[in-house]
Image (cartoon, coloured by chain):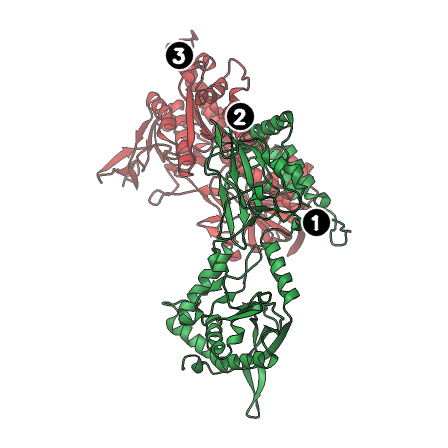
Chain colours: A green, B red
Amino acid sequence: MGIHTIKMPDIGEGIAEVELVAWYVKVGDLVAEDQILADVMTDKATVEIPSPVAGKVLLLGGAVGQVMAVGSDLIQIEVEGTGKSSPHAPRIASSLPPEGADPAWGGPAPDRSSAPATVVEPTATVAAPPPAQREAAAATGVATVHARASGDKPIASPAVRRRAWDLGIELQFVAGTGMAGRITQQDLDAYAGRAGQATSATQADQRYTQRSAEESIPVIGLRRKIAQKMQEAKRRIPHFTYVEEIDVTELEALRTRLNAKYGTQRPRLTLMPFLVRAVVLAVREFPQVNARYDDEGAVVTRYAAVHLGVATQTDGGLMVPVLRHAETRDLWACAAEVLRLSEAARAGKVTREELTGSTITITSLGALGGIVSTPVINHPEVAIVGVNRMVERPMIRNGAVVARQMMNLSSSFDHRVVDGMHGAEFVQLLRGYLECPATLFVE
Amino acid sequence: METLQTTLLIIGGGPGGYVAAIRAGQLGIATTLIEGEQLGGTCLNIGCIPSKALIHAAEAFHQTCHYAGKSPLGIQVDAPRIDLTQTVRWKDGIVRRLTQGVAALLKKNGVTVIKGWARVVDGKTVEVQPANAAAAQRIVCEHLLLATGSSEVTLPGLPFGGRVISSTQALSPTTLPKRMVVVGAGYIGLELGIVYRKLGAEVTVVEALERILPIYDEELVKPVAASLRKLGVQVLLGCKVRGLNAAGDAVQLSNASGEISELPADQVLVAIGRAPRSQGFGLESLLLDMNGRAVKIDDQCKTSMRNVWAIGDVTGEPMLAHRAMAQGELVAEIIAGKRRRFAPAAIAAVCFTDPEIVVAGQMPQQAALAGLDCIQASFPFAANGRAMTLEAGDGFVRVVARRDNHRIVGWQAVGIGVSELSTAFSHSLEMGACLEDVAATIHAHPTLGEAVQEAALRALGHALHI
């Protein structure tokens, strides 16, 4: 028997540390070759770590939520033969560095200060258990827990099924410890116990019952990245937000007509491609908003290209995939790319490259856009354009009250490098393009 | 018109309806049940129970005749005869005892029973013309449960009447026909065909498909086909029935190549299946979602209309009394506020031919279609001591289990008396048993059930008695 140690791989160029976001195995589990062991996350992309060998898991190198240095020991697997990597047995436990750099880790110290408080002390989880305890863990882990393949129906006796219904528990979420993954009454007890006492009083009127449960949710993974980005932006950037209303009646007429005409052959147009085009044109006159500000180096870099960040809500949280070289795309190419990016982001398939390098950002909540918003700038950019809800409103045109499609744009600028005057002029230029859509195509 | 109020109104007093009513009564739900004919429905009156009574009587008579020849058991009797009137009276006695039992249980549980035919007015209102009252009544309910069952399918060109009878009439024979033609080689046709053959009629079974009992695989059906040959039941496969001939004393058939022939018949039993009873009483006006003629339901027996429920045969296949009963119990409990779902691991189905066939869970080809990698093994009754002592060496027990974790997904058996094994089959499937569970359970010796254990052992590669 040998020990195979898998080190935290270098996932993206220039990344010194990655965050451990999920373990799919535990100590004592038997793993097959190519089985996914863990998910780790870099700046934004999540990467699966497969096992290069088959064997039994001896040690996990960290707890979920822990930020680990590239090259540090991720997991140790007991394998047939002599093993590989560093066979110096429980190295991880002894080599957890004190605060500060440790050359052995090949990078900066793990960012333990930012690990959530609810996570168990890392040393406790990685310390090698005494042999007896380890054997017991291995025995129970291997002999009694049989994972159900996804899609398999949960197997439980009629009495267990009935009790689960009474408790309002969906059996598909209950782990089965019986033969072939069968769910026992004890498994149900364990699950119900975890779910709390809320399920016990199912018959009583719950509308006015006192609720005192607390839930600690570790802010890890994408949520931590979002938190850090937002904190960074708000702490560093003195925002000013400028709101202007836009008459989009003509734009909507054009959009409807184009969709009717090309409805079947081309991607359906939303407002987004038009706004993208307007931004592309407007930044030519106001290059100071299509820029990134390195405030430590005191340099603003203006870009000829427009790499447009498109704020996208995903199940995991906010992501900003980047529409590259927006200036090269016509309406439909733009619509297709925005659709592709948002779907990729929602499916979790977006790559690291597609999430970095934006020069200005658009954020839109669609029908939820509200009247006014105060968008947070996507640091280190210097401007963000927010789209509010489109609504038909009575407006006065030539002395008469007429119904017009109105929509507000709420835009934020970095006041350090964009003056109020220029921000306002930029938005007015956008408004000009959007209110007279022909100008979007005439240069 | 008199208007009555009730919480739960059940249309149909068959196994589904009466069980729902009993359970609802136990749970304190005000319940009214409308039945147009006799309590007990198809099952107790013209289905499961009377057919099994006749099967038993015919088998006893057949055995006695068998002894009158040269019995290996050494029993000697002189030419036995059967008094068919007494046989039917005995059968009717059983039916009466059971239906009266149902009536007593309903009464005990406080269920109001109205005899009469119901007509659905809307999802909460039903009109009924009670058999014993002059005026029609209107019943307004909170929950409406449709348990109207099914009726025999007729064959175009061969309407019931005269020599052409349905299974209902076949269960109450007054005289024995000399020559009987049975149309349909499904389980009803074969069960009754065998009864009439054992009672002494010349029986020919005509089937449009190329095989008998087409829902089962070849292997399961083989012992039944052999038994039919031995009993002298003629089976004509791939033949379509066109109708009676001009004289009305023979059935006209056409075979696969279109040749037309005539088959003389004193009686023609049409047993080509049953269809949900969903028409003719105003149900159409509710515009419920349907599956063909069956009312569409979800896993709580809810129809597409709120608080209108449906159970049993009217909801389509599998048309089995025990399914309807389980659904009836379920609906009553849901109405009482319990959380229930119809999620059985298996509903066993038994075919009371000679020999019997029982299936529970998935057959090998069904498991394969479901994408499961399965192992199967069978154990023959020829190697079972108890079967030999019962002169029942034909048939086998077969188990189907997943290859990866050995969880049993199906059981099949064919043989004399195997219907009672359905209990063990359903139990192991509902408990999620693995082959090892059954293989390591001590099965009493000498019983047919040992074949169940041996099948599991054989699937694991170490059967003992073969």
Residue B192: percent from left, percent from top: 41, 30
Question: Circles 1 and 3: CB distance less than 8 Å?
Answer: no
The number of discs equals 3
| Chain of the residue under label 1 | A
Q: Which residue is mark 1?
A: A215
Q: Tell which residue pokes out farthest to the top in this image.
A: B74
The residue drawn where x is 51% and y is 72% is A290
Q: Is residue B14 visible?
A: no
**Which residue occupies the extreme bottom position in the image?**
A399
Q: Residue at x 41, y 82 (%)?
A: A443
Q: Which element type, helix, strand or loop, lies under badge 2?
A: helix
Considering depth in this image, is A321 or B37 the residue closer to the camera? A321
- For the residues beneath circles 1 and 3, the answer to whether they share a chain is no
Asked which secondary structure carries label 3, the reply is helix
**Left or right placement of residue B267 versus residue A408 in this view:** left
Q: Earlier in the sequence, mark 2 or mark 3?
A: 3
Q: Chain of mark 3?
A: B
Q: Nearer the viewer, mark 2 or mark 3?
A: 2
The label number, if any, that marks residue B424 in the structure image: 2
The residue indicated by pointer 3 is B68
Q: Position of residue B289 (x, y in %)?
A: 49, 53
Tell me if label 1 and label 2 are in contact, CB under 8 Å.
no
Instruction: Report helix, strand or loop for mark 1.
Output: loop
Asked if B90 appears above or below A369 in the picture, the reply is above
